[in-house]
Amino acid sequence: MEKLTPQEEEAMKAVWRAGSGSVKQLLDHLEEPKPPYTTLASTVKNLEKKGYVESRLAGNTYLYFPAISGEEYKKKFMNSVVKNYFDNSYKELVNFFVDQKQLSPEELKDILKLIEGK
């Protein structure tokens, strides 16, 4: 599966939050500023073509629902980031955030607790 554009990711988040729904219902699950109805409809159709959402006809309205969970998407995306930017090393990923001072010592302790708890 290919990486989503920021616009597609926002639409996908709405689908995940809603569970399923029409384009109109999905609009209710988007944050402001919301795109026009037609823009969201096109984006959702693209997501369907890419295999991220599925649809079924309910009366005269299409309902869309996720074909992949948010966790599955995160896993695929993060694995790709680690592989392509950090030589397939999660240690290098963490080291990057430490070097950038984006992880505090407290957050590192929390990460260690998570690892030790597994």
Image (cartoon, helix red, strand yellow):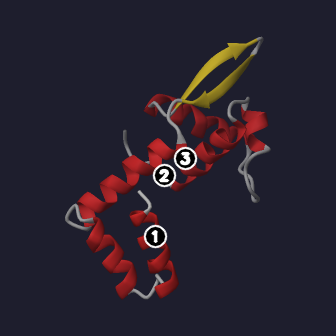
Task: Kindly state the secondary structure of the residue where label 1 is placed.
Answer: helix
Q: Quadrant of the N terminus?
A: top left
Residue most toward the top?
59
Task: Kindly state the secondary structure of the residue where label 2 is placed.
Answer: loop
Q: What is the x, y in percent for residue 60?
A: 76, 14
Dots 2, 3 in contact, CB < 8 A: yes
Left or right position of 61 against 78: right
Between disc 2 and disc 1, whose residue precedes? 2
In 3D space, how far apart are the residues under numbered discs 2 and 3 (Cα atoms)?
Answer: 5 Å
> Which amino acid, by three-letter code, is at mark 3?
Glu
Left or right position of 16 against 111: right
Q: What is the x, y in percent for residue 20?
A: 69, 30
> Which amino acid, by three-letter code, is at mark 2?
Thr
Q: Quadrant of the C terminus?
A: bottom left
> Which amino acid, by three-letter code, is at mark 1?
Lys
Q: What is the x, y in percent for residue 58?
A: 74, 14
Which mark identifies residue 35?
none
Dots 2, 1 in contact, CB < 8 A: no
Count residues near mark 3 (Cα–Cα under 10 Å), then give few for <14, some for 14-19, many for 20+: some
Which mark identifies residue 8?
3
In 3D space, how far apart are the residues under numbered discs 2 and 1 (Cα atoms)?
Answer: 34 Å
Left or right position of 40 against 118: right
Count residues near mark 2 (Cα–Cα under 10 Å), then give few for <14, some for 14-19, many for 20+: few
Identify the residue at image location x=64%, y=27%: 64
Residue 39 visible in this rendered orientation of the protein: no
User: Please, is residue 67 above or below residue 34 in the view?
Assistant: above
**Quarter of the image where one finds residue 57:** top right
Residue most toward the left?
87
Residue placed under numbered mark 2 in the picture = 5
In 3D space, how far apart are the residues under numbered discs 3 and 1 (Cα atoms)?
Answer: 34 Å
